[in-house]
Amino acid sequence: MRFLPIAGLLAAMASFQLGASFAERLFPMVGPAGAAALRLLGSSLILAVFRRPWRGLANGPPAPALIAYGVSLGAMNTLFYLALARLPLGIAVAVEFIGPLGVAMVASRRLLDLVWIALAVGGLLLLLPLGLEAHSVDPIGVLLALAAGACWAMYIVFGRRAGHAHGGHATGLGVFIATLVFLPPQIALQGPALFPPAAIPIALGVALLSSALPYSLEMYALTRVPTRVFGTLMSLEPAVGALAGLTLLGQHLSLLQWTGISAVMAASLGAALAHGAAEEEPPQPV
């Protein structure tokens, strides 16, 4: 049934945003970078138990693409949490969304995509700390979210290559590599303070909600629905983030900020529909 994978994808988005809202509870305890490190550690443990990713090394050592995938994954999570400490959840997700949207635009050759690019840029400008909204949006937070989006773009590019080399174990191996890179610096900086007893159950919950569960649900949906449907539904993620921030964190956005988020969503929707249509077009005879 088509309903089940679509419901799974919607549940994955809700799970990710719920995990992000819970992650903010870790910030006063261990800081945003520490929260990201604990999330990676928890995700590694969960995936090690349920997925046994080391089986993906049966054909050889980690490929360079897998290492780049893991580093970009860890950097994406760390930068996003640093941005989340300064921005409302919905704005952070919308700004970060520019990364995968950019990947879709670069891969396209259609003139219509210029419209989606302009719409995305317009939405981003509405979210930037300019004019009347300058007092309510942290410019450093915006830069951190943009950097997280750039890492998200690299995560997509290198993730595809890592998947070809290591199959379904690429995600678990990538998370493990990210943990090896980003956890030791936090241990060196914070020592035992990185592992307060009150933070451990929250970190495991964040790891489950933001990594293990949504990644599994997204993979289930990705193999069962057309690319156009998948991309269309994913374009809802900034709105899901904004609603999660409103209901769970009490983060109220202005009409201008909602307009900016809607513009980014519309650009993502247009790009997804155009990309899906291009994939579904039959080959033209020579």
Image (cartoon, grey):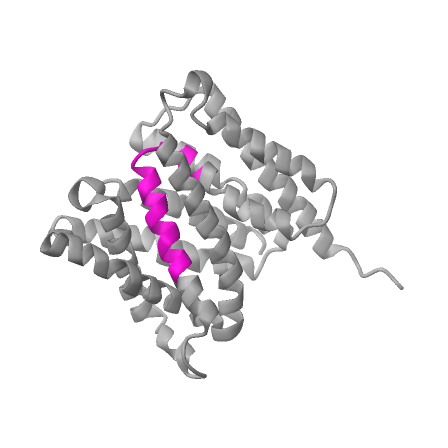
State yes or no: residue 77 in magenta: yes
State yes or no: residue 88 in magenta: yes
Residue 12 percent location from the top left of the image: 43, 50
Q: Nearer the viewer, residue 15 or 82?
A: 82
Residue 256 percent location from the top left of the image: 49, 21
Q: Residue drawn 40% across and 21% down?
A: 134
Judged left or right of residue 263, residue 218 is left
Q: Nearer the viewer, residue 253 or 10?
A: 253
The C terminus - image quarter:
bottom right
Q: Is residue 87 above or below residue 164?
A: above
Looking at this view, name the residue that lies furthest to the bottom. Answer: 59
Judged left or right of residue 187, residue 266 is right
| Residue range corresponding to the magenta coloring | 71-93
Magenta: main secondary structure = helix
Residue 202 percent location from the top left of the image: 21, 49
Q: Is residue 212 above or below residue 253?
A: below
Q: Is residue 190 above or below residue 254?
A: below
Q: Residue drawn 30% across and 62% down?
A: 181
The N terminus - image quarter:
bottom right
Q: Residue drawn 33% across and 49% down?
A: 78
Q: Residue drawn 33% across and 66% down?
A: 176
Judged left or right of residue 152, residue 43 is left
Looking at the image, can residue 42 be seen? no
Choose top left, top right, bottom left or bottom right for residue 74. Answer: bottom left
